[in-house]
Image (cartoon, helix red, strand yellow):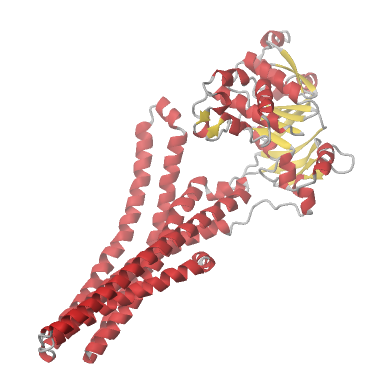
Amino acid sequence: MRLMLHYIKKHRGMFLIAVAFLTIETFADLLQPTFMSYIVDRGVKGQQMGLILRYGLIMLGITAAGAVGAVVRNIYASRTSQLIGKEIRLEIYEKVQTLSYENIDRLQPASIITRITNDVTQMQNFINGIMRIMLKAPVTCVGAVTLIIFQMPQMLPLMLVILVCAGLLIYGNMKLGYPRFDRMQRKLDGLNRTSREFLSAVRVVKAFRAEDQEREKFGDASGQLAEAGISSMRVMAVFGPLINLTVNAGIVVMLWLSGRELTGEIGRLMACVNYMTQVLFALGMVSNILNSAVRAVASSARVQEILDEVPAQKEAAEPAKEDAPEAGEKEKCRGGGEGDTPMGDIVFRQVSFAYAGTSRPAVQEASFTVRAGETVGIIGPTGSGKSTLVNLVPRFYDPTCGQVMVGGRDVTRIPMARLRREIAVVPQKALLFTGTIQENLRWGNRQAALEEIRHAAEAACAEDFVAKLPEGYDTQLGQGGVNLSGGQKQRLSIARALLKKPRILILDDCTSALDATTEAKVLAGIRRESAGMTVLLVSQRISTVMRADHILCMEDGRICGFGSHEELMEDCAPYQAVYRSQIGDDESAADAWEPRTVQLGGGVYHG
């Protein structure tokens, strides 16, 4: 709730304007029955047409004032709630950007999406309701009760009984409703997660004809949400009619009592009945807005959980100028790290890492050194920890223990902006965004000219297929680059990384969708652009890594070999097994396997 109060306070000017005009509207509604009673008891009963016209004109003016108040109140209430919703979403989005992979894994992307969309909408609707209904309801209720007592003082005990009973019912509604609405939001998380998994893997689902299985999963998640929703609405279904029954019973008692005392003052009786109807309406509004408040408080707590999340990775405490060096200093920091250590140097010292919620480390006691400008091939079976290992260099995750050094400094002591400015990553799964090809490539360099973009695309063997597209580099891509093949997306991802001109280039099995000939051409292009770069090349193909400066062989999260191809063929059994499985026992078979020889970074590769 404090989050909503914070934003209401931030926009208190517009909020107070809405409340002021809401007050005008409310008082206009409260004055109508009183003047109607004057028309009946004074004008109609006394047959004074002048009084009837006078009170009628007054009622008309009051109605007009109420209408103006309602219009202005609606305008400011809608504007204020929409601005608050926009700012809360932006704050969540900015917070999520500061979180590490570990935080996001724990919060779960589907849940984060629900909080940015549905939960913020619940809060936005509640804030809008405050300015439209919630403040009007208690004012209307108190005003109507006061005017009933003013018209008929003997009804004070009856009004107190009605208000106490209604208050207890509203409290019970909130007490039982809160946990149910919180549970409903969590079930909505589950439904979003199931939908997201299906939509992201729709091709696999269709390929394996698993539609029935996915339909069953979605039906189960939808059923759980429906069950939670029914449980929440059942509370409203019980307490809402009970509140109506309480007030309507009060109207009956009031009519019975006033029938004996106000037989000659029909106008006053009409006004009191009208005010009781307004009390009923106000209590109904209070009940509804409190139900909305229960949802909003539950949603606010879920949003606050993200905003209060402490990033698992701490930013390095260095002067701001080091984080954003001046143009003259930038080249200096690109060329070197701590002292005389080049920025491209990478050192792992007894590094271990385990994902949150798992007991078995994905990387265990890894120690090795890569000198600036060298190329290291990383190979091993699926699940051996290759991708996890390279993800520690740009600090996507921090080691559970040990040190990762870049440029002679622990990566945890280098500001992330500076560290990642010097690193380009091409991940296993090529990730493109909605927008044009040119916009996607400019992620590597926002100021890149079209010629630079074409040069990088040519190096990645993407220029040819882009040129054949009707709109070339202005071709619009769907979400995730859905209108391109896997190999085309990989080549554009490589071009994007090359356009950045990093000191460290991480290629995480990024040519897996390419045939051997195309891969050789891509590696040749990378070689031309990566001179002087430190290259970490993860691959499943031994022919891709066998001529690197060094080869790091992994098995079950451990480094089981580190050296040249010849050294590993002598004393690393897992590497020998991979070699025999892919190329065979005959060393000459490797030459037949490789359609083209290329040099990458500081090493020579065979594609």
Position of residue 139 relative to residue 83, above or below, is below
Q: Is residue 581 visible?
A: no
Would you identify the image quadrant in which residue 139 lies? bottom left
Quadrant showing the C terminus: top right
Q: Nearer the viewer, residue 251 or 229?
A: 251
Q: Position of residue 487 (x, y in %)?
A: 57, 22
Q: Is residue 388 above or below residue 36?
A: above
- 308 or 149: nearer the viewer: 149
- 334 on left or right of 202: right
Q: Residue at x 43, y 53 (%)?
A: 118
Position of residue 279 in the picture relative to residue 51 (left or right): right
Q: Position of residue 540 (x, y in %)?
A: 64, 24
Q: Position of residue 93 (x, y in %)?
A: 56, 51
State the residue at coordinates (26%, 81%). Answer: 162
Name the residue rendered at 45%, 28% in the picture: 204
Q: Position of residue 513 (x, y in %)?
A: 58, 22
**438 or 488: which is nearer to us?**
438
- Above or below, 518 against 318 in this view is above
Q: Quadrant of residue 602?
A: top right
> In this view of the protein, which residue sits in the foreground, 40 or 581?
40
